[in-house]
Amino acid sequence: MNILMIVANPYSHDPRVKSEAEALVKAGHTVHVLGWDRHGTFPRSEEINGVLVHRIGRTLGMKIMPLDILRMRFWWKEAVRREAPFIDKIDVIHCHDLDTLPIGIRLKKLRKIPLIYDAHEIWGYMVSFDIPWWKRYINLEKRLVKEADIMITVDEPLQEYFAEFFGRADEDAKLSSKPIYIIKNCKEFNEVAYQPPTEKIFTMVYAGTLGASREILELMDAVRETDNIKFIIAGSGNKKYVRKVKKHCSQNNNVKYLGRISQEEVIALTKRCHVGVCLLGKGTLSNKMALPNKVFEAMVSGRPLITTKGLYYSDFAHEKGFGIPVGSVDECIEAIKILMADPKKYEQYGVKALEAALEYNWANEKEKLVEIYRSLGKKPL
């Protein structure tokens, strides 16, 4: 089967999309990925582990617009134009998140082929911290998602959310009449035994999206006031926020910012450190339903994860025995002090994380993805 995946980033640093694309290649499919290289820093075309990657840079129309979200319409049009050379070979379109769905719908209608919508989150809530008109995208997703033939999402709460409107035949229908599958953001797991951290000073780590909802700056300030602790940060995000992170680092000797790193480097970094941290703001429905990469990175690394009390991902990690729920940054620091005083305790959390990874790993999840495509090839939609 010839598959076209569409993602509004350069692909190279998107762990979920890469894992899915490579799994489908290993299953015998041909996978093209059409990505958006906003800054023109990647090759226009390349092959990565068997995946054929095609990237769109900024056109003149995109450069004129002040915000990425306003550039999307130009990106959609350019994506359709760039797609023309190999569209006749495509059997199915696989769109990642709302910012690619309009392109997928256009190509589905042109080519008359199935469309899979892969919702990593509720996109409108994700942009709500930066864009005043974010509610427009909540309603847009509810309308456009009905054009997809199959949905994939990352956890049970999001499955329930999308089931309320995806594929509904009429207003009286309470649940979706079309399938919504769950493919979690699990990681490769080699089933190794617990390995202690190698950082000499007790080290907390966060590697991922940088933004106000993650409370990184607040954590940096709290760490500055705490003795014998180090905080390593990696990732990218809002430019203004990243500049603030860098400024904080310049004023704080026990905090280090590494920039954006690969998924492989994230796991290796997490294993070096004593505890992971992933605090999420409670202000959006998306965060309440999220099951972030950090959960699964902590699992395969054998590390405890400090989480925000009262959210789904926090309950999930706590139930598996490796999550430490806290209600504030101050509680986070107190939890770290308890771990610092008792190495056996963070080892116990780490062992529980590895036990959870025996069930929640990419080997299990990718088989679900492959089966979706296997079933798709057997019957018309």
Image: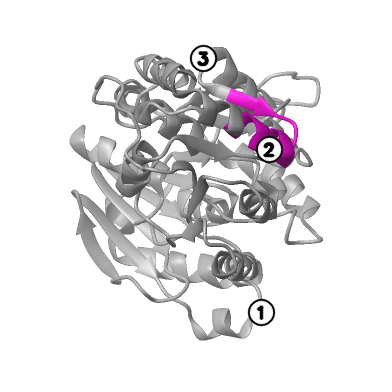
Q: Amino acid at mark 2?
A: Asn
- Residue 201, x across and y down, in percent: 43, 43
Q: Report the residue marked by disc 3.
A: 320
Q: Residue at x 40, y 62 (%)?
A: 10
- Residue 267, x across and y down, in percent: 35, 40
Q: Residue at x 31, y 28 (%)?
A: 377
Q: Report the residue marked by disc 1.
A: 66
Residue 151 falls left or right of residue 309:
left
Residue 130 falls left or right of residue 21:
right
Q: Nearer the viewer, mark 1 or mark 2?
A: 2
Q: Amino acid at mark 3?
A: Lys
Q: Distance between the Cα atoms at labels 2 and 3?
A: 19 Å
Magenta span: helix, strand or loop, mainly? helix
Residue 181 falls left or right of residue 130:
left
Q: Report the residue marked by disc 2.
A: 287
Residue 253: mark in rendering? none
Q: Which residues are magenta?
A: 324-336
- Residue 185, x across and y down, in percent: 44, 33
